[in-house]
Amino acid sequence: MTNKFVHDFSGKTVVLTGAGGVLVSKFAEAFALAGANVALLDLNGEAAQARADEINALDIEGKAIAVVCNVLDVESIKAAKETVDAEFGGTDVLVNGAGGNNARATTDNEYHELDLPEETKTFFDLDQSGVEFVFNLNFLGTLLPTQIFAKDMIGREGANIINVSSMNAFTPLTKIPAYSGAKAAISNFTQWLAVHFAHVGIRANAIAPGFLVSNQNIDLMFEADHKTLKPRGEKIINGTPMGRFGEPEELLGGLLFLADDKAASFVNGVVLPIDGGFAAYAGV
Ligand code: NAD
């Protein structure tokens, strides 16, 4: 037993989906800096390769590979797993990071009103295929890679799964019913996995990032100059007791803690908010 935790993932393989993106590429770098070999899976192979090249340029122990993978296509995930197995000899930690919202599943208005302008895209105009896209990407896109990777993680010491939930899983955000529901499903599924795999040594936890500025949301938070807050950005800041957006780096401590079997060996089925207090604040 020790109370000095230095996250050391030497000899471990961490597979991350959505790793060509803003947040998960940072996660991959953090694991590599902590000694892990990392496989950056993404539908966008170029983005994943660019991020893997950046990691490999760091002159560190952990090595990075980029693998094209569609988390909604079982054959594509199986092929990605074969590549990871051949390069790194199996998976110890799976980070299900691919996810996001879609404009076709987003309303223009926060509240339904009787006198909305004609052109408003209301709840009644939401597109079924947009809602399906969001549920599939977030929920199925977490379930399918888990099915394919977790089977061979059984029996590997310290194996665990990290899912990426969101603030909207605790309390839905206005305008984005599908994304909120899909992330709530991810939190729920994280608990399900934690129970299901408890007898075979795989832990499952999630992080729930608060509001960070990224490609996905910058235009929702800021005007075109990307400096002036839009009303929604202002509301978020007012709803965050710490009074600011988070930085992607601020997710890394929680992420590494949950994934590190020396630090979190008895932590299973939690959804860790990393949010400046947003989820704790009733607004009064
Ligand atoms: P991002 O858009 O920068 O990255 C998402 C990545 O997923 C992209 O590289 C994209 O190519 C990839 N992707 C999309 N569809 C895919 C598919 N079918 N198969 C494989 N890869 C696919 O997003 P981000 O901000 O880095 O978000 C990462 C995760 O964090 C997501 O699950 C998101 O919902 C979640 N999240 C983000 C925030 C935030 O503030 N940015 C907050 C809470 C949760």
Image (cartoon, rainbow, N blue to C red):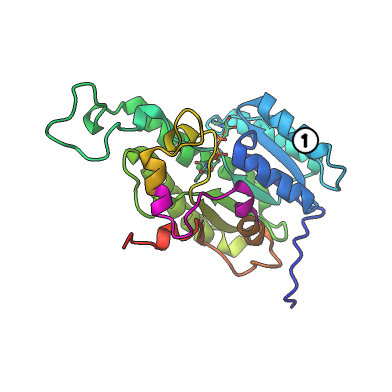
- Give left or right: position of 119 versus 29: left
Q: The magenta stretch spans which residues?
A: 236-252
Rendered position, 141 above or below 208: above
The quadrant in which the N terminus is found is: bottom right
Mark 1 surroundings: few (<14), some (14-19) or many (≥20) residues within 10 A: some
Q: Please name the residue shown 41% across and 58% down the image.
A: 279
Residue 90 placement (x, y as % from top left): 74, 45
Residue 107 placement (x, y as % from top left): 30, 32
Can residue 15 be seen in this snapshot? no
Residue named by callout 1: 54
Rendered position, 199 above or below 166: below
Q: Toward which corner of the image does residue 50 lie, by quadrant?
A: top right
Q: Is residue 161 magenta?
A: no
Can residue 99 be seen in this snapshot? yes
Number of marks drawn: 1
Q: Is residue 243 magenta?
A: yes
Residue 58 placement (x, y as % from top left): 83, 41
Q: Amino acid at mark 1?
A: Glu
Secondary element at image label 1: helix
- Give left or right: position of 64 versus 110: right
Residue 24 placement (x, y as % from top left): 62, 42
Report the front residue among 82 and 237: 237
Q: Please name the residue shown 66% across and 40% down the image.
A: 25
Q: Which residue occupies the extreme top position in the image? A: 119
Report the front residue among 25 and 149: 25
Q: Please name the residue shown 27% across and 35% down the image.
A: 109
Report the front residue among 231 and 89: 231
Report the front residue among 19 and 244: 244
Which image quadrant shows ligand 1? top right
Q: Please name the residue shown 64% across and 50% down the image.
A: 249
- Give left or right: position of 225 versus 262: left
